[in-house]
Image: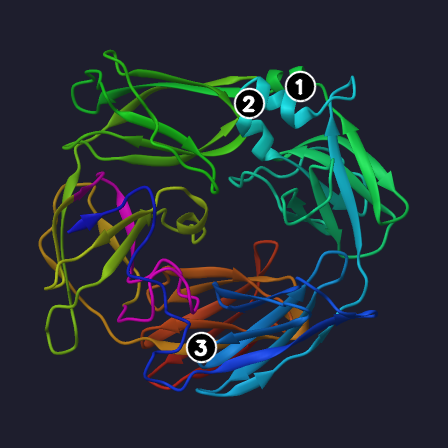
C-alpha cells in the first residue's frame, strides 16, 4: 500500500484525450478582433476540472484528440475581453469554433519603494521572496472597507472585477509588475494586496492605464508572521525530536523544518494569513494536518502538539462478484453534522490499496475519518478518475483498530447538472443516501457540470450564502442522468 499524505494524488485523473484506437476529433477555428486575426491568442478547453489549451498562430488554432462530451471553450488575448462557447463533441468529429473578441480594459500595476525604487527588487534583496509571490492587485467596484476574507491561497488572481496576471516575458510590457484584466469598464478601485491584506487603494477613471503604488518594504517586513510549537508523545508527554513541521499555502509546498531535541520548532518570517500546517513524525506516530491563521506581525504559539500512535486500517474493496478491486481512498477528518468539514479543513490523506483491493498495515490518527473512494473530486476530470467507486463512509478509529471491513464498489454514471437562471451565483452540496457529503461546488447559469457517481440515492442541496434554499433527491442508475438545478 502506498501513501501520499501531503498531496492528494490518487489514480490518474480521467484522460480527456481520446483513446488512440478511436478516430481523432479536431476542434479548429480563428480568433479575431475588430482589426483582424489576433496573433498569440489562446483558447482554453475545459470539462469539469480537466483543461487543454491551444495557441492561435496568426489568429488560427487547432486542437486534436479531445474526448467526446460537452466542453467549454474560452478564447482570450491581451487587451481583449474573453469569449466563451459551449459545445458537444462526438467521437471523431470535426468542430469549427470562430471567436470575435471585443477590445477590453486593463490596468498595469507597478510597485515602488517610497524613493521610487523597484519594490520587488528590494524585497528580494531582503530575502523576502514569499512576500513577492503574495503581492498582487485586485479591482473592485467600491473601495474595500478592510482586508479581504482570509484564504489559504497565496494570492487571489481572480477577485472582484478583474483577473490579475503577474508580469512575465509573455506579457511583454516593461517596468510593470502585473496587469489586471477588467471585466467591466472603469471607474474601478484598484488595490495593492498582500495575500488578503489591503495595503493601498486608488480609484481609476479610465483604462488602459498604469497605476503605481509606493509601499515601504520595512512595512511589509514588519507584517511578517511566525509560528512556534512543541511536539510531544500523546501518552507519555515526552518530547519528539526530528518531527518535520511545514507551513504551506494551497499554491506552495516544502519539506518543513525538524523539531529539536526538546521537540521545539519555530518558523519565522512567514507571510500572514491562513496556512496549511503539516506535522509529520516518524512511525509509529501519526501525521497531523490542520489550518492555522497567522496574524500580521505576530508569532502564533500552539504550545504542545500531542502526537498519538497511528491506528492500523483494515479495509478491502471488491466488485459485485466479490473480486478484489485496486482503488484509491481519500481520508479527511469527519465532523458530525458539519457537511462542510471535508472541504474546508486541511487534513487530506490519500492511500492506495494493493491489487486485491486490500488496505492493511497503514495507520491514521485515532479519530473519526470520512472516506471517499477512488476520487477526491467527483466532477468529471477531477482527481481520481471514472473508475469504480462507492458512497462515502465513516471510519471510526477513536477506540483503536477495527475488524476488516469490506466495501463494494460499482462503475460510476455521468450526472449532468444544468443550473437554471435563478441558480446563478449559488452553491450546492451533494449528499449520499447516508447523508454524508460527497462534494460541493458553485453554480453558474449556462455552465453545466458533470459528476461521476456510483448507483444509489442522493440529495442535492442548493445554498445561498451557506443557507439551504432547495433540495432535490434523485436516484443514480446505469444510464446518464440530467438534472436542472435552481431555487
The verdict on residue 255 being magenta is: no
Above-or-below relation of 462 to 465: below
Give the CA distance from mark 3 to mark 1.
49 Å
Categorize mark 3 by other alpha carbons within 10 Å: few (<14), some (14-19), many (20+).
Answer: some
Magenta residue span: 363-389
- SS label for mark 2: loop
Chief SS of the magenta region: loop
Q: Nearer the viewer, mark 3 or mark 1?
A: 3
Categorize mark 2 by other alpha carbons within 10 Å: few (<14), some (14-19), many (20+).
Answer: many
Q: Nearer the viewer, residue 109 or 390?
A: 109
Is residue 483 shown left or right of residue 346? right
Q: Earlier in the sequence, mark 2 or mark 1?
A: 2
Give yes or no for contact between labels 3 and 1 (Cβ–Cβ under 8 Å): no
Task: Indicate which disc residue 217 carries.
Answer: 1
Q: Nearer the viewer, residue 404 or 263?
A: 263
Q: Position of residue 196 (x, y in %)?
A: 62, 35
Above-or-below relation of 400 to 233: below
| Residue 272 visible in the snapshot | no
Question: Which residue is rendered at x = 72% and y = 56% of the image?
Answer: 78
Task: Indicate which disc residue 128 carries.
Answer: 2
Give yes or no for contact between labels 2 and 1 (Cβ–Cβ under 8 Å): yes
The verdict on residue 365 being magenta is: yes
Q: Position of residue 434 (x, y in %)?
A: 33, 64
Q: Earlier in the sequence, mark 3 or mark 2?
A: 3
Question: Which residue is rendered at x = 29% and y = 57% of the image?
Answer: 10
Image quarter (top left, top right, bottom left or bottom right) of the C terminus: bottom right
Name the residue carrying label 3: 65
Task: Indicate which disc residue 186 carries.
Answer: none
Q: Nearer the viewer, mark 3 or mark 2?
A: 3
Give the CA distance from mark 3 to mark 2.
44 Å
Q: Earlier in the sequence, mark 3 or mark 1?
A: 3
Amino acid at each position: 500500500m502506498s501513501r501520499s499524505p501531503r498531496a492528494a494524488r490518487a489514480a490518474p485523473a480521467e484522460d480527456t484525450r481520446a483513446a488512440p484506437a478511436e478516430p481523432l476529433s479536431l476542434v479548429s477555428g480563428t480568433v479575431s478582433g475588430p482589426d483582424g486575426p489576433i496573433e498569440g491568442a489562446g483558447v482554453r478547453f475545459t470539462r469539469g476540472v480537466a483543461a487543454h489549451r491551444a495557441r492561435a498562430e496568426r489568429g488560427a488554432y487547432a486542437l486534436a484528440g479531445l474526448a467526446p462530451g460537452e466542453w467549454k471553450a474560452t478564447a482570450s488575448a491581451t487587451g481583449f475581453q474573453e469569449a466563451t462557447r459551449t459545445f458537444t463533441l462526438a467521437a471523431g468529429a470535426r468542430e469549427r469554433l470562430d471567436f470575435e473578441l471585443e477590445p477590453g480594459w486593463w490596468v498595469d500595476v507597478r510597485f515602488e519603494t517610497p524613493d521610487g525604487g523597484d519594490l520587488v527588487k528590494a524585497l528580494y534583496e531582503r530575502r523576502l521572496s514569499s512576500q513577492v509571490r503574495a503581492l498582487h492587485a485586485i479591482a473592485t467596484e467600491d473601495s474595500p472597507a478592510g482586508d479581504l476574507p482570509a484564504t489559504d491561497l497565496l494570492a487571489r488572481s481572480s477577485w472582484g472585477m478583474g483577473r490579475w496576471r503577474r508580469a512575465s516575458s509573455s506579457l511583454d510590457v516593461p517596468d510593470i509588475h502585473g496587469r489586471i484584466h477588467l471585466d467591466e469598464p472603469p471607474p474601478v478601485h484598484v488595490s495593492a494586496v498582500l495575500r488578503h491584506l489591503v495595503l493601498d487603494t486608488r480609484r481609476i477613471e479610465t483604462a488602459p492605464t498604469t497605476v503605481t503604488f509606493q509601499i515601504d518594504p520595512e512595512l511589509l517586513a514588519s507584517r511578517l508572521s511566525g509560528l512556534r510549537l512543541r511536539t510531544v508523545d500523546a501518552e507519555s508527554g515526552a518530547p519528539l525530536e526530528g518531527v518535520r513541521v511545514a507551513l504551506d499555502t494551497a499554491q506552495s509546498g516544502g519539506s518543513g523544518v525538524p523539531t529539536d531535541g526538546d521537540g521545539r520548532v519555530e518558523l519565522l518570517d512567514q507571510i500572514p494569513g491562513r496556512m496549511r500546517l503539516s506535522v509529520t513524525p516518524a512511525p509509529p506516530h501519526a501525521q497531523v494536518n490542520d489550518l492555522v491563521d497567522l496574524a500580521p506581525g505576530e508569532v502564533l504559539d500552539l504550545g504542545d502538539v500531542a502526537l498519538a500512535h497511528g491506528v492500523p486500517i483494515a479495509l478491502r474493496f471488491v466488485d459485485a462478484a466479490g473480486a478484489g478491486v485496486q482503488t484509491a481512498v481519500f481520508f479527511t477528518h469527519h465532523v458530525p453534522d458539519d457537511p462542510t468539514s471535508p472541504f474546508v479543513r486541511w487534513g487530506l490523506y490519500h492511500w492506495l490499496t494493493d491489487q486485491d483491493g486490500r488496505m492493511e498495515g497503514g495507520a491514521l490518527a485515532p479519530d473519526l475519518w470520512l472516506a471517499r473512494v477512488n476520487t477526491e473530486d467527483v466532477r468529471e476530470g477531477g482527481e481520481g478518475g471514472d473508475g469504480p467507486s462507492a458512497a462515502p463512509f465513516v471510519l471510526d478509529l477513536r477506540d483503536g483498530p477495527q475488524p476488516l471491513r469490506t466495501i463494494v464498489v460499482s462503475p460510476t454514471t455521468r450526472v449532468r447538472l444544468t443550473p437554471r437562471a435563478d441558480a446563478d451565483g449559488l452553491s450546492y452540496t451533494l449528499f449520499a443516501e447516508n447523508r454524508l457529503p460527497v462534494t460541493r461546488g458553485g453554480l453558474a447559469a449556462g455552465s453545466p457540470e458533470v459528476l461521476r457517481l456510483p448507483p444509489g440515492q442522493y440529495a442535492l442541496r442548493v445554498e445561498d450564502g451557506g443557507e439551504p434554499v432547495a433540495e432535490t433527491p434523485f436516484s443514480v442508475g446505469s444510464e446518464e442522468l440530467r438534472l436542472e438545478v435552481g431555487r
